Amino acid sequence: MFIEPSPNTRRPAERKGQIEVICGSMFSGKTEELIRRLNRARIAKLKVEIFKPSIDKRYHESDVVSHNENSIRSTPVQFAGDILLLAGDCDVVGIDEAQFFDSELVRIAQVLANQGKRVILAGLDMDFEGKPFEPMPQLMAIAEYVTKVHAICMKCGDLAAFSLRLTTSMDKVVLGEKESYEARCRKCFLEDKK
Ligand SMILES: Nc1ncnc2c1ncn2[C@@H]1O[C@H](COP(=O)(O)OP(=O)(O)O)[C@@H](O)[C@H]1O
Ligand SMILES: Cc1cn([C@H]2C[C@H](O)[C@@H](COP(=O)(O)O)O2)c(=O)[nH]c1=O
Ligand SMILES: [Zn+2]
């Protein structure tokens, strides 16, 4: 059952804070879902701050942009600790591409939530080898709400939870789009993985 997390509209002194994780493969709609929740928080007149890792400049220097070109203004940061400094008195913190931060993000998400903020993180739960992509497993463990979204397998049309890398690089971090990754279901991923 999908429960949409509450937008955090209680008066500031009464807010409990919460952590939400949106995870899945590439092209599964993580960024779209993040943008949707953040736009709805703004409609609820909440103060929203959005961050992404500064290494991710695929579509835009600063904006968070989905594969179907939805976008929202964000602040690129190098370190998770920067988010704590820049979040200020906002009500809701959105973080995209959470898998590119180090484990410090787990502590930062908890500090922000303990201040009463709603913290929404989107990121890849598995890398190109199908292995958990740190720090996503830790974030999922401490979150009140975890939403796993799925892409469509580009080989068979079933639901896809895996990101197949089309190039031969074995580096963990290789930025890219459709030219270098495709969504796959488990069976097609195992068949095609290098
Ligand atoms: N294989 C695919 N499965 C589903 N959506 C896809 C696929 N390839 C491209 N898309 C597009 O990607 C959009 C989702 O983009 P986005 O939210 O940026 O995903 P993510 O952040 O999970 O990579 C979809 O709405 C669709 O237009
Ligand atoms: C699987 C995998 C992906 N990446 C990179 C490729 C993209 O730049 C991002 C994921 O973007 P999306 O918003 O989820 O589509 O991550 C990587 O560096 N390593 C990997 O194993
Ligand atoms: Zn398939």
Image (cartoon, rainbow, N blue to C red):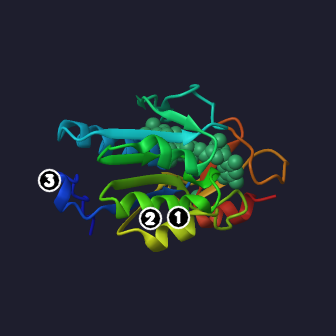
Residue kind at label 3, given as amino acid type = Arg
State the residue at coordinates (52%, 64%): 107
- Please report the residue visible at 33 percent of the width from the left and 40 percent of the height from the top: 48
Q: Are marks 2 and 1 in contact (CB under 8 Å)?
A: yes
Dot 3 or dot 2, earlier in sequence = 3
Amino acid type at circle 2 is Gln
In the depicted view, which residue is nearer to us: 127 or 95? 95
The front one of 167 and 171 is: 171
Label 3 Cα crowd, 10 Å radius (few <14 / some 14-19 / many 20+):
few
Q: Is residue 29 left or right of residue 188?
A: left
Q: Is residue 70 above or below residue 50?
A: above
Labels in figure, total: 3
Label disc, if present, on residue 55 of the rendered structure? none
CA separation in Å, label 2 and label 1: 5 Å
Residue matched to label 1: 107
Residue type beneath disc 1: Arg
Say what secondary structure mark 2 lies in: helix
Of residue 97 and residue 67, the one placed in the foreground of this image is 97
Q: Which mark is residue 110?
A: 2
Give the numbered dot on residue 11. 3
Tag 1, which secondary structure?
Answer: helix
Give the quarter of the figure containing the N terminus: bottom left
